[in-house]
Image (spheres, helix red, strand yellow):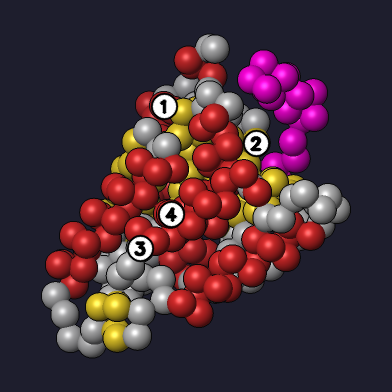
């Protein structure tokens, strides 16, 4: 495999956000892709559950950040993520700025990924929305001659918007039936964040999407949307995957 041509970048707002596409990432890892995740914040303003029924109210947010970093490190090993980078932005206060977009342009041009995954821009959390907007703008700027000091221009072949709690358009379904148990292991890692009702919702979404695979042997799927401004070159897509499957 061409080591210069096998990178997948996942941009997320918080630790645990990779749950929206963990099954797909595990499948891609098995196909020989290198997985990198860029996480915007430390998730220090999220909930902190002592157990599934008790939520802490008064706690040190820096301590929670440490807990969440430990969790994402453990989860990344299960998924097969090769590298995790934190941008160090404040949780629940992410805002798209020209400097942040340029920072992402530099990352995209340096890493030159085959695929980028990012939140859907109409997701429920403002951090998810802002990260999505930044990444889409950065991908656009990365393929032009904008600021050559940030690296050589590069067009990302495939950009996919991952489905969160708010349903998007089901442009692409990925069968994750074989990765269901491993995805449950990843969910188990996030004891500080995931409570039973939320876990049930995550599982229900995957089962609902799995129905549309129209195969009784397939139970679970993850769903992705193709951004309007980033149509996929079908021949390029076939070329990418025919060399790996």
Instruction: Give percent across and percent down for residue 223.
Output: 68, 54
Q: Do the residues labelled 3 and 2 touch (CB within 8 Å)?
A: no
Of labels 3 and 1, the one closer to you: 3
Specify the segment rendered in magenta. Answer: 224-245
Choose top left, top right, bottom left or bottom right for residue 67.
bottom left
Instruction: Give percent across and percent down for residue 207.
Output: 69, 63
Choose top left, top right, bottom left or bottom right for residue 240.
top right
**Residue identifier under label 2:** 158
Q: Residue at x 18, y 60 (%)?
A: 66
Q: Are marks 4 and 3 in contact (CB under 8 Å)?
A: no
Of pointers 3 and 1, the one earlier in the residue sequence: 1
**Residue identifier under label 4:** 185
Of labels 4 and 2, the one closer to you: 4
Of pointers 3 and 2, the one earlier in the residue sequence: 2
For the residue pair 225 and 103, the one nearer the viewer reads as 225
In this rendering, the answer to whether 167 lies above or below 10 is: below
**Residue identifier under label 1:** 110
How many angstroms separate mark 1 from mark 2 (CA)? 16 Å
**Mark 4: few, some, or many residues within 10 Å (few <14, many ≥20)?**
some
> Which of the numbered marks, if any, corresponds to residue 190?
3
How many angstroms separate mark 4 from mark 1 (CA)? 32 Å
Of labels 4 and 3, the one closer to you: 4
**Mark 2: few, some, or many residues within 10 Å (few <14, many ≥20)?**
many
Q: Do the residues labelled 4 and 2 touch (CB within 8 Å)?
A: no
Badge 3 marks a residue whose secondary structure is loop
């Amino acid at each position: 495999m061409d080591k210069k041509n096998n990178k997948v970048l996942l941009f997320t707002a918080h630790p645990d956000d990779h749950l929206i596409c963990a099954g797909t990432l595990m499948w891609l890892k098995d196909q020989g892709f290198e997985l990198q995740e860029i996480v915007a914040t430390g998730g220090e303003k999220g909930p902190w559950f002592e157990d599934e029924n008790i939520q802490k109210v008064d706690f040190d947010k820096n301590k929670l950040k440490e807990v969440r970093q430990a969790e994402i490190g453990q989860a990344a090993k299960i998924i097969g993520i090769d590298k995790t980078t934190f941008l160090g932005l404040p949780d629940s206060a992410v805002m798209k700025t020209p400097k942040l977009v340029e920072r992402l342009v530099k990352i995209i041009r340096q890493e030159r990924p085959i695929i980028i995954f990012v939140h859907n821009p109409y997701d429920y959390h403002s951090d998810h929305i802002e990260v999505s907007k930044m990444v889409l703008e950065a991908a656009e700027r990365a393929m032009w001659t904008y600021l050559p000091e940030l690296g050589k221009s590069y067009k990302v072949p495939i950009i996919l918007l991952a489905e969160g709690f708010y349903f998007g358009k089901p442009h692409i379904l990925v069968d994750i039936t074989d990765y269901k148990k491993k995805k449950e292991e990843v969910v188990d890692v996030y004891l500080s964040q995931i409570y039973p009702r939320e876990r049930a919702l995550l599982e229900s979404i995957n089962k609902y999407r799995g129905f549309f695979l129209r195969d009784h042997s397939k139970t679970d799927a993850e769903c992705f949307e193709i951004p309007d401004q980033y149509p996929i070159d079908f021949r390029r897509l076939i070329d990418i995957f025919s060399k790996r499957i």
